[in-house]
Amino acid sequence: QRQQRQAQVSSRRDGYNENSPRCIAFTGSNDKNTPVDWYLDGKIGMYPLVEYKQARRTTKYKSKGEIYPFDVSITVGVYQKYVLEELLPDIARKCPIEMLAKTIWIQHDNAPPHRINQAAFDLRCRELKIDCRMFYQPAQSPDFNVCDLSFFRSIQSLYYKLGGGGRNIDTLIAGVDKSFALYDPINLNRGFLSLLMNYNLVLQNDGNNGYATPHMRKKCLKEPESYR
C-alpha cells in the first residue's frame, strides 16, 4: 500500500486554478524590411487581434464616426485567418533559406479556438513553398511553451519600462509593437534554455510538474556572437 501511495504521488499532476486571471492573446509583425540574408532573431511576429470599425458614439477615447480598433473574440475562424494570412507568410519571409529547407514545427496550446483546417493549412504551406507542421503542448502545461514560460512576462516588463500603460487600444498596440521590436534576442535565447531545463525536469520526475526550476546562471553562459 505504501508503494502504491508513493506511485500515486509521483505521478500526480497539479491542476488548473479556476481563480487565476485570464490573459488576452496578442500577436504582430516585427520588422517588415528585414534583409533575406540577415540572421533570424527568434521573433516571428506579434499580431494585434483587433478589428477597425467606426465608433458608434463619442467617448473620451474616440469620437463618433472615427475609425477605431475594437478587440474581437478569438474564434476558430479568426485564429485560422491570422495563422494562414499573417504567421505563415512571415515565417516564409523571415526564416533563413537553410531553416526553410527543414520542417518547421508550430506549437499551439489547447484553447478550444486554436484549431486549423488541415487541408487549408497544407495548401497555404505549398503556396509559400515551406514545410510546416502543427503540434499541441500537453494539457495544463504552460511550462512547455516558451511564450507562457518567460516571453509574455518579459515583454510586459519591457512595455512598462518604456512608459507603457495607456488605456487607449491604439496606445497599447503601439507600445507592444515597440517593445517587441526592441526586445533583446539574448533574453529570448535564455527563455529557450529554461524551456529545455523544464523538459529534463519533467522526465526526471516521472511526468510530474511539481518541480522547482533551478538557477542556471544563464547570464554567465556564452551568448551567440550573431546576437551582438
Image (cartoon, grey):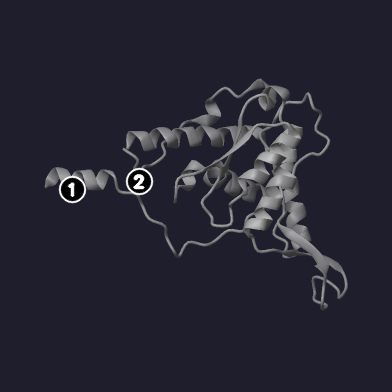
Q: Quick one: which residue is furthest to the front in this view?
A: 119
The quarter of the rendered structure image containing the C terminus is: top right
- How far apart in space, not on screen, are marks 1 and 2 (Cα)? 16 Å
Dot 2 falls on a residue whose secondary structure is loop
Q: Residue at x 33, y 33 (%)?
A: 204
Q: Residues within 10 Å of mark 2 (few under 14, many from 20)?
A: some
Please name which of the two marks, 1 or 2, marks the residue nearer to the observer.
1
Amino acid type assigned to the residue bearing label 1 in the image: Arg
Q: Which residue is mark 2?
A: 210
Q: Which residue is mark 1?
A: 5
Q: Is residue 167 visible?
A: yes
Amino acid type assigned to the residue bearing label 2 in the image: Gly
For marks 1 and 2 on the same chain, the one whose residue lies earlier in the sequence: 1
Residue 86 in the image: state x and y as whole percent.
74, 45
Residue situated in front as seen by the camera: 77 or 210 = 77
Residue situated in front as seen by the camera: 212 or 95 = 95
Q: Residue at x 17, y 45 (%)?
A: 4
Residue 144 in the image: state x and y as whole percent.
48, 42
Residue 119 in the image: state x and y as whole percent.
64, 44
Q: Residue at x 71, y 35 (%)?
A: 126
